Image: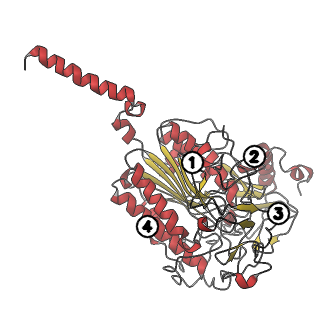
Amino acid sequence: MNTFKSAIYSFLILSVILAGCAGNPRNAVSETAANDKPNIVVIYLDDLGYGDVSAYGAREIHTPNIDRLATEGVMFTDGHASSSTCTPSRYALLTGVYPWRNKDAKILPGTAPLIIDTAQITLPKMLKQQGYYTGAVGKWHLGLGTGNVNWNEHVSPGPNEVGFDYAYIMAATQDRVPTVYLENGLVQGLDPNDPIEVSYSKNFEGEPTGLKNPELTTMKWEHGHNNSIVNGIPRIGFMKGGEKARWSDVDMADHFLAKAKDYVKQHKNEPFFLYYAMQQPHVPRTPNPRFVGSTNLGPRGDVIVEADWCVGEFIKTLEEEGILENTLIIFSSDNGPVLNDGYYDEAVERIGNHDQNGGLRGGKYSLFEAGTRVPFITYWKGKIEAQKSDALICQMDLLASLAKLAGTEVKTTDSQELLDVLMGKSKQGRKSLVLEASTRTALREGNWLMIPPYKGPAVAAHVNIELGNSPEFQLYNLMDDLGQQENVAGANPEQLELMIEHYKEAIGSLNSEVEQLELK
């Protein structure tokens, strides 16, 4: 080929390449640059306690797959959800905003409207802007629609409108109606001749309930779960129709796992973010028959083992697809544990020597440490060195931290950029953190925890958990008293006064009763 023909040939080849890039903006980003971005997976359990994982001290439950993440990654001993209940914590994780700033960020009914403003920055939206494909699989419980949902049509706004390219979810919780799955806003398997009706105020004529028809139930309710019966389980709320679309409770873990694995396989060739929100060990605890009897603790213990197996199978998929080394996994729970949360399932009677709190005080719904201190692990094979970290960190910090990992930054008041802490390169975590439990708030500062005076019961009767309410200020030194057995407010008036001052600076006038009480 002579010189002239060679030049023409090179020009044509270059033209084809440039045309291809121009025709597909995504291809305009070099493949090398795209591959530099790690996949990010958040595995989020529901009501898993600090002491429910064997790496964190559990002896009656064995969790080898979660333990692998903990022993080969950064195992945080002071990692927190933002709240001791589910919806607020999920709101904070996805938005990077304290939940007490949003009056609607509280435990929601299944018919609640979306509580995330579609205009605000979110974790998936930020990552999507950085070239990530974003997905949510599992529990949602952040509201859907605008308040009057027609479940027989496309439901919007929802996960897709706050940054998720793909969403396969249940609307609220396993114990609430509607008991159906939605994929990108559409109820799956719905027969148009059998439309769904949902209400949280009154039953539909002729529909059985757990309250009036206990003979139709296979799981007995203890409190609050006596409305519509689905699969023999009485739920919160009333539902009619949609028979073919209703989920199988014992297959739910397998179902969500399959969707998470499929998501990985479909998007392994591009940077992806997956929010994998499991339903275990929230009630109703319905382990697949394969896991029944895998512990001596009854269904609660069995579903934790089931969840651990799901984690292992998910990791195996990352390995088989050749992307484990390019995937950051963050594992945690939305709040602390609860045993009896509405059903008679022997969680209390069979607890034995198991300490779901891991030596902490309180639990779900509580301002004590067991309410928000949860298993918190970061794992990235070959990138993160195995270690324990006592850095104070919160799930709310993922927004700012992962923004830096993705090559950008976000302007945020509440989410702190702690990427080096997540990666195990630093143990300088937060200096302070406002914790929340059902709109009540407390302040962590270093190893000190200050709980303002609150009216109300000291113990939640139905769940038998200490709430942290007291007519007096409470101050605990967690360095010397991790179990919070001694209120040292009286012995440390200067420290208490300092923390009250910092609390007011952080909270403002939310808890006005604090401003009216004199320091004693």
Mark 3: amino acid: Ser
Q: Nearer the viewer, mark 3 or mark 1?
A: 3
* Residue where numbered disc 1 is placed: 398
Q: Amino acid at mark 4?
A: Gly
Disc 4 from disc 3: Cα separation = 41 Å
456 left or right of 256? Answer: right
Dot 4: few (<14), some (14–19), or many (≥20) neighbours within 10 Å?
some
Residue 80, horizontal then vertical, whole percent: 62, 57
Point out the frontmost of discs 3 and 2: 3
Image quadrant of residue 3?
top left
State how far apart marks 1 and 4 are (Cα).
Answer: 23 Å
Q: Nearer the viewer, residue 75 or 405?
A: 405
Circle 2 sits on which residue?
101
Q: Looking at this view, name the residue that lies furthest to the top.
A: 4
Counting from the top left corner in percent of width and height, residue 148 is at 75, 51
Of labels 1 and 4, the one closer to you: 4
Image quarter hosting the N terminus: top left
Label 3 belongs to which residue? Answer: 201
Disc 1 element:
helix
First along the sequence among labels 3 and 1: 3
Label located before the other in sequence (1 or 4) = 4
Is residue 378 depicted above or below 129 in this figure?
Answer: below
Q: Position of residue 345 (x, y in %)?
A: 66, 81
